[in-house]
Image (cartoon, coloured by chain):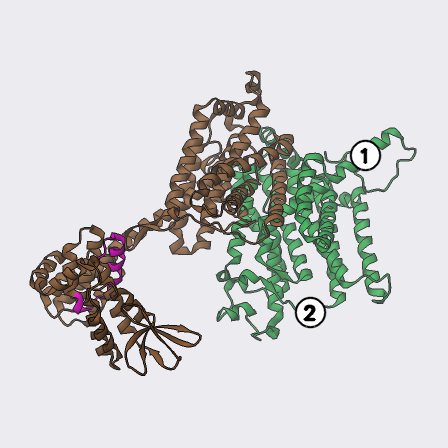
């Protein structure tokens, strides 16, 4: 529909517009002689805002490279009126007053006192007009991102006078997402049209838009219109928009759930190895995550100029550091406590206190911020109400990649075979010639290293502080126990279902209550099925 | 072998020694505080009295944990929750006693409710203006929670590490819940600004001494109760459950009933400890639910020595004394010391300090056989728990 109107208006107004369009196309043919600009600028000296608006529109229509800087200067109160001559000039404020420059050539003219010139006054209406005119010019930019931003500025702000220029732009536009935005802007502006048929067409077209400005414009229309058919159409369109927004909000919640789930997966997967495969309760697991996060921080501090790729170094580095700490813990503490899980729990908790305090002493108790690299910030915008932030998106993929790598390691490699053998029956494994001490140390190091990698990912989402690990330890245990100890697929399922359940409950109950509900659910669930979702069968299930 | 009447629990040598030391020390402190002028070098300040009272509350809490962990093998990482619930019940009574002396001067509502614009007392605050009701709740609330939780957990045979982790989740969930203002327990700030208990001002020295005596008596009673339980036939079944649960079940005992019973008793004792703790420190807030507190408690018991009862008491007092000293002298070293203690005790001292002392003692006795067997030290008598 919108396209039809667009085409109609285009043909109608093309002739009138030729000038502007051609002028825009010709921007790089070099500066045209300037006196015209001076005359237009001097109209800004008028006290009437209507005169000023007319001058701004006229200025914007000029084909001259100075137009955009001048409009910006007007916005920033850098255009001043010289008191003696009454001329509008560029003014630079300095300690002696104003340095006046020619607005077109920027040639210095004279230095005057601070009272000898005053900035041209504009109000909010004029600011919108200037912004719109700037946006309209940006729509001619060769850079599609700039055109996209400009079209976004025009949505809900475009005034009826701009319709024709906008329609012309729409006809020339080739990029779909910019086309969509211009259509929305055009349709919203058309809602103020006097022609009922055009308005109805615009309402119909807006029903497909998810832009918040479209919703607001339709609401205004419902309130302002006295035509029942139009009100009905607008209400129908609104209902359709609401329904779609709701669907996308559910998708948004699911995405956040998946992202929380992948964080839980990353945090829990190392635990799934040390607890699930080795039967060691490592309460210092959270602190190993914290060490990974601090490693990320330290690497960024060491490579201050390369935030973009320091993350790629941080991943292996965090793995190594955490794995090393883990192996030390295994060699000096846990080794003496195999077969005494409750004692292991206490000893590793002691280790966690020591690690936390060590970090407080070394890095201070304050939180540290890790810079997010450029390629991880921003969002993949699917439509105005639904966008996927890149950092969460990457973490989902990253968690899955780590999971698959670990699974392959355990199922396909010789080391994995040894790990599984020792975890199933230590004595027989030793009888078959496996050095179980060495396997234990390596397995524990592996689990700890993965905790370190989780720390790298978490550093992108939260602040890095000494308590970072503590806040994840209970959650990670819940995930492992809920999924079924010793079952990596169970851990995966548990992490994602708990993450999604948490986020689904959040809008209804609030964040804290959602967490409490999930905890209570797990407590009750474990009492129904003490071995988790996917219990181990056979000999390994016996304690 | 001891016989198992309650009276005999009073008269057995360990209990006598324990009560003698405990009540003697309390008496001395009381006398020194009350009958020596503040400038005398023998005077014990009110601060020290309260500190001692606090230690004894911790000792009672540790005792309750030793009952389930030492004798039944249930490592609860959520015992702090029962302690805190008892404390909150007491705190609610103390809140109601403030009456119109609060900042807002509302005779009915505690200050934080006025602050939250609540117009009337929530139903679960009703009755807490009566001491007998609050006292009942101090026993009932932790007991009931332990009963329901234990009933669900033991019936479905959640054991060992799993049980530890879900008890930890329990106290964590309670902590999150109590942090919420909407729950009606003062949120983040908890309950504080107490004025008086049963008409006695909480600021006066004599009330503080009275609370110390009450705590010491409660600890003594609880100790005798635990001695009695562990010496009774029921206690022996509980220990059998600890050592070989499947075997005890096959012999025909409903092991889950025994576990549930001991768990509930222990939770009630922890609740009493919390209730005695709150008027002495003057505040109860959700931080008491934090999983760290519950785990620290486990370390007291481990340091003292499990399954001896007095070991838990000694451990609680020693570790907390250490904490007071350390946090005063070099606060940043305390967590290092505590963490090191965790590791050292579990790796090198599985029987705790009491175990170490009794081992040394046994070795000494072997070297120098005694002529006279009457000695009244705090080392365990023969025929003790393992």
Pick out the residue farthest to the bottom.
A84
According to the rendering, which colour does chain A have?
brown
Which residue is drawn at the image coordinates 30% and 52% (left, top)? A386
Identify the chain drawn in green. B
Q: Quadrant of the N terminus of chain A?
A: bottom left
Packing grade of label 2 (10 A; few <14, some 14-19, many >=20) is: few
In 3D space, how far apart are the residues under numbered discs 2 and 1 (Cα atoms)? 50 Å
Which residue is drawn at the image coordinates 68% and 47% (left, top)? B62
Which residue is drawn at the image coordinates 48% and 43% (left, top)? A456
Q: Quadrant of the C terminus of chain A?
A: top right
* Residue A478 left/right relative to A500: right
User: What are the residue bounds of the magenta stretch?
Assistant: A140-162
Task: Decide whether residue A118 is among the magenta residues.
Answer: no
Say which quarter of the image contains residue A409.
top left
Image mark 1: chain: B
Residue A438 or B178: which is nearer the viewer? A438
* Residue A49 left/right relative to A300: left
Could you tell me which secondary element the residue under label 1 belongs to? helix
The x and y percentages for residue A54 are 20, 74
Camera-nearest label, 2 or 1: 1
* Residue A415 left/right relative to A79: right
The residue at which mark 1 appears reads as B360
The residue at which mark 2 appears reads as B199
The x and y percentages for residue A10 are 10, 60
């Amino acid at each position: 529909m919108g396209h039809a109107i667009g085409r109609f208006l285009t043909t109608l107004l093309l002739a009138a517009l030729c000038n502007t369009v051609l002028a825009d196309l010709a921007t790089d043919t070099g500066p045209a002689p300037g006196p015209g600009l001076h005359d237009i600028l001097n109209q800004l000296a008028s006290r009437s805002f209507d005169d000023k608006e007319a001058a701004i529109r006229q200025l914007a229509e000029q084909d001259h490279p100075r137009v955009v800087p001048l409009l910006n200067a007007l916005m920033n109160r850098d255009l001043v009126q010289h008191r003696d001559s009454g001329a509008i000039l560029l003014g630079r404020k300095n300690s002696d007053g104003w340095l006046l420059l020619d607005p077109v050539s920027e040639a210095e003219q004279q230095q005057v006192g601070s009272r000898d010139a005053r900035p041209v006054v504009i109000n909010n209406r004029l600011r919108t007009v200037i912004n719109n005119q700037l946006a309209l010019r940006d729509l001619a930019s060769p850079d599609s991102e700039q055109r996209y931003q400009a079209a976004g500025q025009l949505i809900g702000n475009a005034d009826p006078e701009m319709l024709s220029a906008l329609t012309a732009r729409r006809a020339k536009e080739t990029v779909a997402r910019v086309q969509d935005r211009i259509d929305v802007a055009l349709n919203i502006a058309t809602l103020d049209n006097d022609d009922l048929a055009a308005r109805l067409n615009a309402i119909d077209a807006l029903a497909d838009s998810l832009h918040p400005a479209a919703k607001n414009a339709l609401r205004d229309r419902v309130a302002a219109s006295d035509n029942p058919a139009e009100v009905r159409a607008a209400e129908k369109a609104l209902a359709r928009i609401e329904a779609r927004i709701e669907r996308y909000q559910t998708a948004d919640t699911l995405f956040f759930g998946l992202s929380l789930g992948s964080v839980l997966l990353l945090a829990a997967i190392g635990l799934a190895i040390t607890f699930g495969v080795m039967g060691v309760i490592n309460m210092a697991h959270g602190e190993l995550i914290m060490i990974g996060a601090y490693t990320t921080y330290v690497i960024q501090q060491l490579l201050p100029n390369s935030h973009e790729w320091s993350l790629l170094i941080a991943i292996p580095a965090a793995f190594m550091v955490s794995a090393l700490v883990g192996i030390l813990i295994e060699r000096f503490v846990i080794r003496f406590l195999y077969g005494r899980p409750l004692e292991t729990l206490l000893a590793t908790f002691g280790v966690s206190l020591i690690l936390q305090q060590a970090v407080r002493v070394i890095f201070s108790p304050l939180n540290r911020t890790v810079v997010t690299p450029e390629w991880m910030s921003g969002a993949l915008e699917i439509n105005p109400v639904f966008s996927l932030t890149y950092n969460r998106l990457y973490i989902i993929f990253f968690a899955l990649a780590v999971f698959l790598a670990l699974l392959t390691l355990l199922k396909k490699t010789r080391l994995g075979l040894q790990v599984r053998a020792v975890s199933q029956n230590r004595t027989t494994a030793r009888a078959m010639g496996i050095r179980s001490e060495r396997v234990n140390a390596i397995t524990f190091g592996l689990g700890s290293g993965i905790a370190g990698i989780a720390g790298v990912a978490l550093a992108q989402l939260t602040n890095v502080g000494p308590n970072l690990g503590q806040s994840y330890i209970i959650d990670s245990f819940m995930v492992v126990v809920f999924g079924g100890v010793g079952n990596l697929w169970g851990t995966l399922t548990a992490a994602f279902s708990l993450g999604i359940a948490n986020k689904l409950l959040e809008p209804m109950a609030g964040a804290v209550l959602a967490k409490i509900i999930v905890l209570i659910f797990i407590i009750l669930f474990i009492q129904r099925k003490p071995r988790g979702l996917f219990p181990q069968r056979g000999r390994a299930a016996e304690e | 072998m001891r016989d198992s009447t309650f009276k005999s629990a009073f008269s057995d040598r360990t209990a006598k020694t324990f009560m003698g030391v405990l009540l003697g020390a309390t008496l001395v402190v009381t006398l020194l505080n009350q009958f020596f002028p503040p400038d005398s070098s023998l005077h014990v300040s009110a601060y020290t009295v309260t500190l001692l009272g606090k230690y004894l509350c911790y000792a009672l809490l540790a005792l309750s944990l030793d009952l389930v962990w030492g004798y039944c093998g249930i490592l609860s990482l959520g015992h702090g929750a029962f302690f805190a619930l008892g404390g909150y019940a007491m705190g609610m009574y103390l809140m109601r006693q403030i009456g119109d002396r609060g900042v807002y001067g509302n005779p009915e509502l505690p200050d934080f409710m006025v602050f939250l614009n609540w117009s009337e007392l929530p139903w679960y605050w009703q009755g807490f203006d009566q001491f007998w009701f609050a006292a009942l709740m101090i026993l009932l609330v932790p007991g009931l929670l332990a009963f329901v939780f234990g009933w669900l957990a033991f019936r479905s045979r959640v054991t060992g590490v799993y049980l530890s982790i879900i008890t930890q989740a329990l106290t964590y969930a309670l902590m999150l819940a109590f942090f919420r203002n909407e729950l009606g327990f003062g949120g983040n700030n908890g309950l504080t600004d107490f004025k008086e208990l049963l008409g006695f001002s909480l600021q006066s020295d004599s009330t503080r001494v009275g609370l110390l005596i009450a705590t010491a008596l409660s600890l003594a009673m609880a100790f005798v109760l635990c001695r009695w339980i562990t010496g009774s036939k029921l206690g022996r079944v509980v220990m059998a459950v600890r050592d070989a649960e499947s075997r005890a079940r096959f012999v025909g005992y409903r092991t889950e009933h025994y576990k549930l019973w001991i768990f509930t008793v222990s939770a009630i004792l922890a609740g009493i400890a919390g209730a005695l703790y709150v008027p002495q420190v003057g505040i109860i807030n959700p931080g008491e639910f934090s999983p760290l507190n519950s785990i620290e408690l486990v370390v007291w018991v481990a340091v003292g020595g499990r399954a001896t009862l007095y070991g838990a008491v000694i451990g609680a007092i020693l570790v907390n004394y250490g904490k007071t000293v350390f946090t005063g002298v070099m606060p940043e070293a305390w967590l290092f010391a505590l963490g090191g203690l965790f590791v050292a005790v579990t790796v090198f001292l599985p029987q705790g300090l009491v175990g170490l002392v009794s081992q040394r003692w046994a070795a000494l006795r072997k070297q120098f056989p005694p002529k006279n067997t009457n000695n009244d030290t705090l080392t365990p008598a023969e025929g003790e728990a393992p």
